[in-house]
Image (spheres, helix red, strand yellow):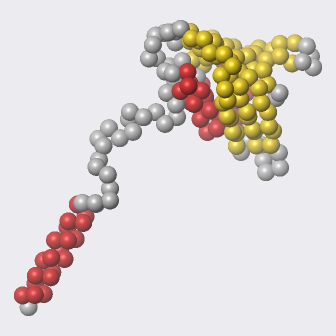
Amino acid sequence: MPRLLVRLIFLLGMAIGLTTCNPFAPALDQEGLSRVDLLGDPSSVDGFFQLFKNAYELRDTTLYGSLFTPDFLFAYYDPDLGQEFQWDRDTEMGISQNLFSQVIQITLDWNYYVQIDTTDTTGLVVRSFNLTITEDEDNAYIGSGRARMELKRSRIGEAWKASYWFDDSDF
């Protein structure tokens, strides 16, 4: 009888010990991921482009809209018409909302920097990219090009935002 009681006490102690301590789990970090911006830190130029990629691939207009100044302009040249077209931020957001809701997948790969000139508060960045837009199981559109972006921010440490984007691509 005493052996059974010892075993029960031992098993009960083990059960309590195992529920309060997991030797395979790391220690609890009280700050968690609060110091990590998994989608991209737009206070750096690289982080701005990482956030842009993630906003596009996640098809998230809230993230996407955070990348642009209120007076943002998008422009592209149509060689067939021999004309440049431009639109404002609201139009860009409407077009993007429509695109994001009509496709099943977008893959954006930012490649090399063709040009990068920055001061503390302004930047001119030209960067090449590859873009795949999958409309459905049978239709995918693949293109490449360069994005020429003018970036702005009020001071060092703040997020870069695009005020102008000229799209030079084959889309």
Q: Position of residue 2 (x, y in %)?
A: 6, 87
Question: Is residue 11 in view from this perspective?
Answer: yes
- Relative placement, left or right, of 22 versus 55 is left
Above or below, 86 against 139 in this view is above
Q: Is residue 122 above or below residue 169?
A: above
- At 49% from the left and 36% from the top, the residue drawn is 38
Name the outermost residue toward the bottom. Answer: 1
What is the x, y in percent for residue 146?
74, 23
Q: Position of residue 139 (x, y in %)?
A: 83, 45
Q: Residue at x 60, y 11 (%)?
A: 117
> Residue sitting at 81 percent across and 38 percent down?
141
Tell me residue 24's x, y (percent): 32, 59
| Residue 6 in which image quadrant | bottom left
Residue occupying the far right of the picture: 80
Location of residue 33 by image quarter = top left
Relative vertical location of residue 11 with respect to residue 109 in this rendering, above or below: below
Residue 62 appears in the figure: no
Residue at the image position 32 percent from the left and 52 percent from the top: 26
Classify the position of the N terminus by image quarter: bottom left
- Looking at the image, which is closer to me, 73 or 9? 9
In this picture, residue 44 sits left or right of residue 18? right
Q: Is residue 5 left or right of residue 167?
A: left
Q: Is residue 75 left or right of residue 28?
A: right
In the image, 92 versus 130, the foreground residue is 130
Tell me the quadrant of the picture where the C terminus can be found.
top right
Q: How many marks?
A: 0
